[in-house]
Image (tube, grey):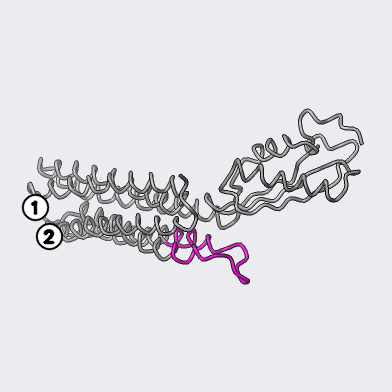
Amino acid sequence: MELRNRDRPLEIRRVLLITLVLNLLASASKIFYGYFIHSVAIVAEGFHSMFDGISNVAGLVGIRFSSYPPDEEHPYGHRKIESVLTIFVGAVMFVTCLEIFRKVYDSLVHKQEIAVSAVSFVLMAGTLVVNIFVALYEKRKGKKLNSEFLLADARHTQCDIYSTIGVIISLILVRLGITYADTIVGALVGVLVAKAGFDILKESAAILVDKRQLDTALINKIVCSIDGVTGCHKIRTRGTNSTIFLDLHVMVNPLLTVESAHRIAHVAEENIRGRIPEIIDIVVHIEPATDPPEADWICKGKDNVEF
C-alpha cells in the first residue's frame, strides 16, 4: 500500500529524528576525542558528522513548512522550501571546510604528538557502523518517500563512511610511526566535505531554476496512445522528484466540438497521472492540428490523419 500524502511529512520527520540522534552522538564523540588526542583527522571527521546533524535539523524545519498545502500567496504549494534548506546544508558544509583546513594548518605549524590507542580504533569502528546504518536507512526511506532531502543527506553520510575508513587507516599509520598521515587524511576529509557540498548545491539549484523533471518522450508516448490525439508538443515539467508540474499542448482534429476536445484533454490527464503519480498538476492546452502537421509534433502512426 502506497504511503498517503498526509503521512509522508510525518514519516520523513521520524527518519530525520532518528538519524539526528545518531549523528549527534557520533559527531560529539569524535570531536571531543579528536581534540583530546590532538588528531586532525578525527576532529575533521567529527565536524563532518556534526553537519549531518545540522542537516537533519534543517530537514525537520523544511519538511514542517513544505508540507503546508497551497494557499492564495503560494498557489503551487511550499515544497521548494525543502530544496532551499538543502542548499543551506550544502553552503554550511563549505563553512565546515574552513574549520577543517584551519586544523590542518595548525597541525603543520604546531606539531603535536597524537596519542593513538585501542580506544581510538573502537571509537572509529563504532561510528563507522552508525554511518553505514544511517546512510542505508536514509537512502531506503528517501526512495520510498520520494524525498530529495533524505537522498541528499544519505549521500552526505556516505561520504562519512569513506572518510571514517580513511581516518582508521591514518590511525594505523600513526601507530606505525607515520605521523603526517593524520594531517593528510584530515585534508582529504576537507576535500570530501567540499565536494559533497558542491554536489548538493548543484542538484538543489537545478530544482529551484525549474530543471526538467521527466523525459518528454514518455509523456509523448502516453498522450499519443489516446484516440483522437494527432500530435503533442511544448511538453514542460518542473518541480521536485515527488511534486512534478506538467504542461503540454495536444493537437486534435480542428472539426471536433469543444466538448469532445475537452474529453480528450481529461483522458490525457487521467492517463498521465495513472502512469506517473508524482505529477500533481497538469495543464493541457488543446489546439487544432495543422494541415500538414509539423513533423516533430505528429504522433507516430498518425501522420496520415484526414481533416
- In front: 161, or 242? 242
The disc placed on residue 163 is: none
For label 1, the residue is 115
Q: Residue at x 36, y 63 (%)?
A: 57
Q: Secondary structure at mark 1?
A: loop
Residue 232 lies, with reference to residue 110, above or below; the image says above
Q: Is residue 279 magenta?
A: no
Q: Is residue 110 left or right of residue 292?
A: left
Q: Is residue 113 left or right of residue 57?
A: left
- In front: 304, or 271? 271
Quadrant location of the C terminus?
top right
Q: Is residue 133 left or right of residue 33?
A: right
- Magenta stretch: give its range: 62-88
- Residue 90: percent from the left, percent from the top? 42, 57
Q: Residues within 10 Å of mark 1 (few under 14, many from 20)?
A: some
Where, by quadrant of the figure, is residue 209 drawn? bottom right
Contact check, label 1 and label 2, Cβ < 8 Å? yes
Q: Amino acid at mark 2?
A: Phe
- Residue 118: percent from the left, percent from the top? 7, 46
Q: Is residue 66 magenta?
A: yes
Q: Secondary structure at mark 2?
A: helix
Q: CA distance from mark 1 to mark 2?
A: 9 Å
Q: Residues within 10 Å of mark 2 (few under 14, many from 20)?
A: few
The disc placed on residue 36 is: 2
